[in-house]
Image (spheres, grey):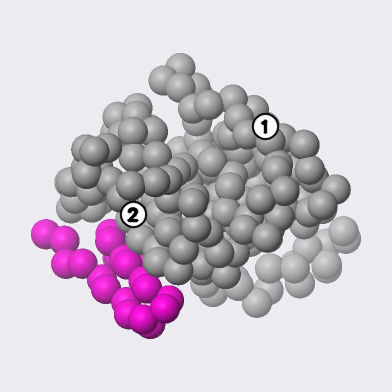
Amino acid sequence: MNTDQLIERYSRQKDIVPMERLHECRATVIGVGAIGRQVALQLAAIGIRWLQLVDFDLVEASNLASQGYWEEDLSTSKVQATSDLCYKINESIEVVEVEERFNRRMEIGNTVFCCVDSIQVRQLIWSVVGDKVLFFCDGRMAAETMRILTACDTASRYHYPKTLFAAEEAFAGTCTAKTTIYCANMAAALMVAQFAKYLRHLPVDPDVQFNLLAMECTVAEVK
């Protein structure tokens, strides 16, 4: 792209997504399933320069309708398939592909989007990165309901661990048992929207829940 095209590329978001602050962020997306894949694609579109994708899984047929993968991605690693599309969206991006489970020794960016399907894994991730990253956002989803948790200041960092309940208290069955692509897209959009507010030094919403079926939205008060 030439200089004029680069300027035009981000012209419609320049007052919403501060590019200087965005370029200081190195974003890690842990889990590139339904929500994580959409988060990665949106980050690539808005101009993130460095993006790390972490996932050990391969694309299966059940991922096509629920996670937005393409038929040609079948049996490919989710990290590779998502990385390839990020480069198609923005050829100047640097994508670090990590085709393995998250672990304590893993080096990550200063911005983390947690998009995993296990409360135990969330607990592990938070225990490792909670006091290291500048911005942390966790997207949870089941069928047509979602919960977006953000931690980037004292109050929200105090609140987030309270949502990491014991595994036996979780709903029976994995959160991926029922998945809709439209709910995942909306959850990803809310996560990136919180990130944009953080970039603008605006207060974020630490705990947002949305039920698409009932069209109910709850924003928790966190002190």
Residue at coordinates 59% horizontally, 64% vertically from top-left? 181
Q: Describe residue 104's horizontal placement relative to residue 151 as left or right.
A: right
Q: Which residue is under mark 1?
A: 97
User: Is residue 87 or residue 215 the one in the foreground?
Assistant: 215
Q: Which range is magenta?
A: 197-223
Q: Which residue is under mark 2?
A: 150
| Type of amino acid at the residue the image marks with label 2 | Thr
Question: Which residue is most to the left?
Answer: 223
Question: Which residue is most to the right?
Answer: 2
| Type of amino acid at the residue the image marks with label 1 | Glu
Disc 1/disc 2 C-alpha distance (Å): 24 Å
Q: Position of residue 47 (x, y in %)?
A: 65, 56
User: Is residue 55 or residue 20 the one in the foreground?
Assistant: 55
Q: In terms of secondary structure, where does tag 1 sit?
A: strand
Question: Which residue is most to the front?
Answer: 172
Name which of mark 1 and mark 2 comes first in the sequence. 1
Q: Position of residue 128 (x, y in %)?
A: 35, 27
Q: Describe residue 188's horizontal placement relative to residue 213 as left or right.
A: right
Residue at coordinates 61% horizontally, 38% vertically from top-left? 53
Q: Residues within 10 Å of mark 2 (few under 14, many from 20)?
A: many
User: Is residue 37 or residue 145 the one in the foreground?
Assistant: 145
Q: Quadrant of residue 146?
A: bottom left
> Does the segment drawn in magenta span residue 116?
no
Q: Is residue 132 visible?
A: no
Q: Position of residue 144 (x, y in %)?
A: 45, 68
Q: Is residue 120 visible?
A: yes
